Image: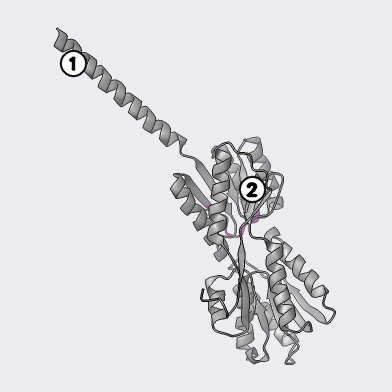
């Protein structure tokens, strides 16, 4: 009688323990945070690196991450934000001008879902924006150009005002070049970035070269990011004008830009953003909020470094 009772108690204990374990596992699975990353710019190398950095950090945290690429369609970001908000994700990360997707951000806010910018721009509807200091990067490369050409000559600028992190770079470069009375901005070009930006920048630079055929008429190309600078380099080389010493600078220091800098040609400098660091820092910001912290900084900056022939191999 005692043995049967003990066996019965043991069976009940085993079943209870199994139920608790199953419930714990089920609860753990349900508790796994779901994060949506939404961008129209995944064709851009920088965005790819941001996302990879975020995914690596998220993997260590055990998150379920859904990356959504709208392939250049900014308006589609709004509906994608609304979709994931309806799916009750735990957080949303965007890489797009928040002012252009305000309707989607409002939907997320109404649903109680925090939204974070990953090199996107500041907005009251974002918890914070994790990025590089665009003001400092633009100042560094614009001053580099001004010094290299001795504060004198024609400069071509490639800008992209539709995206706040890039727009501010153009504003700063404009101000610096405007402080040199003998520097003339020949053209301020906004390239088509649907294919990454190199091809259209090359085509536009070819037209500028044709309109300014005299050697020395163009002293420099300042690009707000590397792709236009690389397109301009291709145009200059195809026109046989690389010997004129046209100075090119970019921002991002992506692999192609680093190769061009190392080659010792016209492309002389870029600023290395810590793309992986931006992605990782964004994941850390998300984790802090999911843990109940209130982030007071509207912008979180990740350090950068000027890259020239002197340190490109570092």
Magenta part of the protein: which range? 68-74
In terms of secondary structure, where does tag 1 sit? helix
Q: Which mark is residue 7?
A: 1
Label 1 – label 2 distance at C-alpha: 61 Å
Q: Give the quarter of the figure containing the N terminus.
A: top left
Q: Residues within 10 Å of mark 1 (few under 14, many from 20)?
A: few
Which of the 4 image quadrants contains residue 70? bottom right
Which of the 4 image quadrants contains residue 182? bottom right
- Classify 86 as above or below 278: above
User: Closer to us: mark 1 or mark 2?
Assistant: 1
- Reading the image, the residue beneath label 2 is 78
- Classify 40 as above or below 264: above
Counting from the top left corner in percent of width and height, residue 298 is at 69, 48
The residue closer to the viewer here, 85 or 93, is: 93
Counting from the top left corner in percent of width and height, residue 170 is at 74, 67
Say whether residue 105 is visible.
yes
Q: Residue at x 70, y 68 (%)?
A: 138
Q: Which mark is residue 183?
A: none
- Classify 7 as above or below 98: above
Q: Is residue 21 magenta?
A: no
- Classify 191 as above or below 64: below
Cβ–Cβ under 8 Å for marks 1 and 2: no
């Amino acid at each position: 009688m005692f043995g049967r009772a003990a066996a019965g108690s043991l069976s009940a204990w085993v079943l209870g323990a199994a139920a608790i374990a199953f419930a714990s596992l089920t609860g753990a699975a349900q508790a796994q945070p779901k994060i949506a990353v939404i961008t129209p710019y995944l064709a851009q190398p920088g965005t790819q690196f941001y996302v990879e950095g975020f995914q690596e950090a998220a993997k260590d945290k055990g998150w379920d991450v859904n990356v959504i690429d709208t392939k250049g369609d900014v308006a589609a970001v709004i509906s994608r934000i609304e979709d994931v908000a309806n799916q009750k994700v735990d957080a949303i990360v965007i890489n797009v001008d928040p002012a252009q997707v305000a309707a989607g951000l409002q939907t997320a806010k109404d649903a109680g879902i925090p939204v974070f910018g990953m090199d996107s721009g500041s907005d009251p509807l974002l918890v914070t924006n994790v990025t590089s200091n665009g003001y400092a990067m633009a100042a560094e490369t614009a001053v580099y150009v001004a010094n290299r050409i001795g504060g004198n000559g024609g400069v071509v600028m490639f800008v992209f005002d539709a995206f706040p992190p890039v727009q501010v770079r153009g504003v700063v470069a404009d101000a610096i070049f405007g402080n040199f009375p003998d520097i003339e901005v020949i053209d301020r070009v906004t390239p088509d970035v649907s294919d990454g930006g190199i091809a259209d920048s090359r085509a536009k630079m070819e037209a500028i070269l044709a309109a300014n055929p005299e050697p020395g008429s163009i002293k420099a190309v300042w690009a707000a990011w590397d792709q236009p600078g690389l397109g301009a380099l291709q145009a200059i080389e195809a026109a046989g004008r690389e010997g004129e010493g046209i100075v090119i600078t970019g921002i991002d220091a992506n692999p192609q830009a680093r190769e061009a800098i190392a080659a010792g040609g016209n492309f002389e400098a870029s600023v290395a953003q810590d793309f992986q660091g931006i992605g990782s820092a964004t994941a850390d910001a998300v984790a802090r909020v999911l843990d109940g912290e209130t982030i007071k900084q509207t912008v979180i900056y990740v350090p950068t470094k000027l890259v020239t022939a002197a340190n490109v191999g570092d």
